Image (cartoon, rainbow, N blue to C red):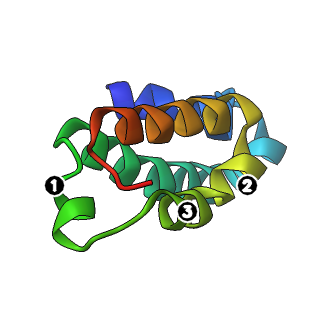
């Protein structure tokens, strides 16, 4: 349910009867979910995958920059997670 709502923050909550917006709803939702879900997963696992592969903050920022095109609000949240991950030692600066 959380991922569902996060995706809608990025992709918009499209009214079920809005034919125009429903045409690309799936694409918008997949893009929002595919980008944000791994970021959230890495954060919640204390950077397990990032650390296993020696990933640095700049790499995470670049890979997730697509979120910015979906939603400024979701992008700001993603940047806060990334910065907090660095602060907590989950991700190398």
- Labelled disc at residue 23: 2
Q: Quadrant of the C terminus?
A: bottom left
Q: Nearer the viewer, mark 1 or mark 3?
A: 3
Residue at which label 1 appears? 48
Question: What residue is drawn where x is 57% and y is 29%?
Answer: 77
Looking at marks 1 and 3 on the same chain, the residue that comes earlier in the sequence is marked by 1
The crowding category of the residue bearing disc 1, from other C-alpha atoms within 10 Å (few below 14, some 14 to 19, many at least 20), is some
Looking at marks 2 and 3 on the same chain, the residue that comes earlier in the sequence is marked by 2
Looking at marks 1 and 2 on the same chain, the residue that comes earlier in the sequence is marked by 2
Question: What residue is drawn where x is 65% and y is 40%?
Answer: 11
Rendering quarter of residue 17: top right
The crowding category of the residue bearing disc 2, from other C-alpha atoms within 10 Å (few below 14, some 14 to 19, many at least 20), is few
Give the Cα distance between marks 1 and 3.
Answer: 17 Å
Identify whether 7 is placed above or below 9: below
Contact between labelled residues 3 and 1, with CB atoms less than 8 Å apart: no
Residue 74 position, x and y percent, is: 62, 33
Give the Cα distance between marks 2 and 3.
Answer: 34 Å
Rendering quarter of residue 71: top right
Most distant residue in the bottom direction: 53
Residue 29 position, x and y percent, is: 56, 49
The crowding category of the residue bearing disc 3, from other C-alpha atoms within 10 Å (few below 14, some 14 to 19, many at least 20), is few
> Depth check: 31 or 35 in front?
35
Camera sees residue 27 = yes
Residue 4 position, x and y percent, is: 42, 32
- Labelled disc at residue 58: 3
> Depth check: 54 or 60 in front?
54
What element does badge 1 sit on? helix
Identify whether 93 is placed above or below 80: below
Q: Nearer the viewer, mark 2 or mark 3?
A: 3
Question: What residue is drawn where x is 32% and y is 25%?
Answer: 1
Question: What residue is drawn where x is 56% and y is 58%?
Answer: 64
The answer to whether residue 31 is left or right of residue 15 is left
């Amino acid at each position: 349910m959380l991922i569902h709502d996060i995706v809608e923050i990025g992709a918009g909550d499209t009214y079920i009867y809005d034919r125009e917006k429903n045409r690309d709803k799936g694409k918008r939702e997949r893009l929002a979910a595919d980008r944000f879900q791994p970021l959230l997963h890495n954060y919640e696992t204390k950077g397990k995958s990032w650390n296993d592969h020696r990933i640095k903050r700049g790499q995470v920022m670049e890979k997730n920059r697509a979120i910015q095109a979906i939603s400024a609000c979701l992008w700001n949240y993603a940047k806060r997670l990334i910065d907090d991950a660095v602060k907590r030692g989950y991700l190398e600066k």
